[in-house]
Image (tube, helix red, strand yellow):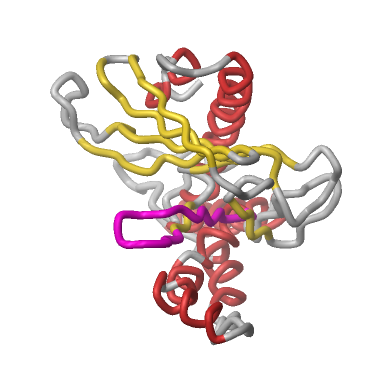
Amino acid sequence: MSNDLQGLRDADGLASRERDVIDRLVRSLSSHRGHNSLLGAYYEGNFKVEDYGIKVDPKMLRNDQVSYWPEKAVDALADRVKLNEIVGSDEVRSLVESVGLVDAYSSHLVDKYVNGCMFCVVARGPRGPMARFHDAMTATALPSPDHDLSVVDAGLAIARTERVEWGGTRPVATLVNAFMPNEVVALRLVGPGRWSAESYRVPERTPTMVAFAHRARGRQPFGKTRISRAVRGISDEMVRTMFRMEGLSA
């Protein structure tokens, strides 16, 4: 379980059903974070190859070879996808423009292709309707039990991170929202590992979270990363080859 969300399922004010759903969501987010961090490292060119097949004196040759093929695998598609507008009534177009949906969608496309999906949550803010996008490092969802790829069964998103007195210098999650049918639960950090929950009823019968997945299918309802195992393997082999070439020429 993620250290940031330790104690979330035991938040004061949660009903038994809410507690069970939030526990599943936290476990889902935690179980995918390691893999998603690895994908991010490949995209940024920060990944390391452990076995180069040869041994050299590290004082003579540093292991600083880099492959940007994972970045190209993502950007080649993200640069071609352009969302210009959403077709609908004047009221829909006005709402889309007021929440900045088009720009927000476009700015998160890289996250979608790195992790396989991104999430959008819709809520009522102090100034009216609002939409926020999250990558798979800060949000997760449970797939529809009816295998409906257009909706989620429940969702969770870290809405705010900040420094707290007991958290040291690293920002921690202080506000987490859980999305369920006809309900949004706001969970606020009130102390080390201590949370309080407040539930809000909403008219929507499906959770107000949507997953935008790349190549979603039955077995992978939240999509497939562009930095596939094949791309990672090719990148590793390229780094090994460059390292061996430098080693032989040293």
Task: State left or right for residue 125 relative to residue 80.
Answer: left
Residue at x-position 64% and y-position 60%:
212
Image coordinates for residue 19, horizontal then vertical, percent? 56, 18
**Could you say which is closer to the camera, residue 46 or residue 224?**
224
Residue at x-position 59% and y-position 35%:
32
**Could you say which is closer to the camera, residue 149 or residue 115?**
149
Residue at x-position 42% and y-position 18%:
6
**Could you say which is closer to the camera, residue 73 or residue 195?**
195
Measured along the vertical axis of the image, is residue 79 above or below residue 9?
A: below
Number of numbered labels in the structure image: 0
Image coordinates for residue 128, horizontal then vertical, percent? 37, 62
Q: From the image, which quarter does the C terminus lie in?
A: bottom left
Majority secondary structure in the magenta region: strand
**Range of magenta residues:** 116-131
Verify whether residue 130 appears in magenta: yes
Image coordinates for residue 127, horizontal then vertical, percent? 31, 61
Q: Quadrant of residue 17?
A: top right
Q: Quadrant of residue 22?
A: top right
Measured along the vertical axis of the image, is residue 19 above or below residue 200?
A: above
Task: State left or right for residue 104 relative to residue 29.
Answer: left
Say if residue 119 shows up in the picture: yes
Say if residue 50 shows up in the picture: no
Residue at x-position 51% and y-position 36%:
178
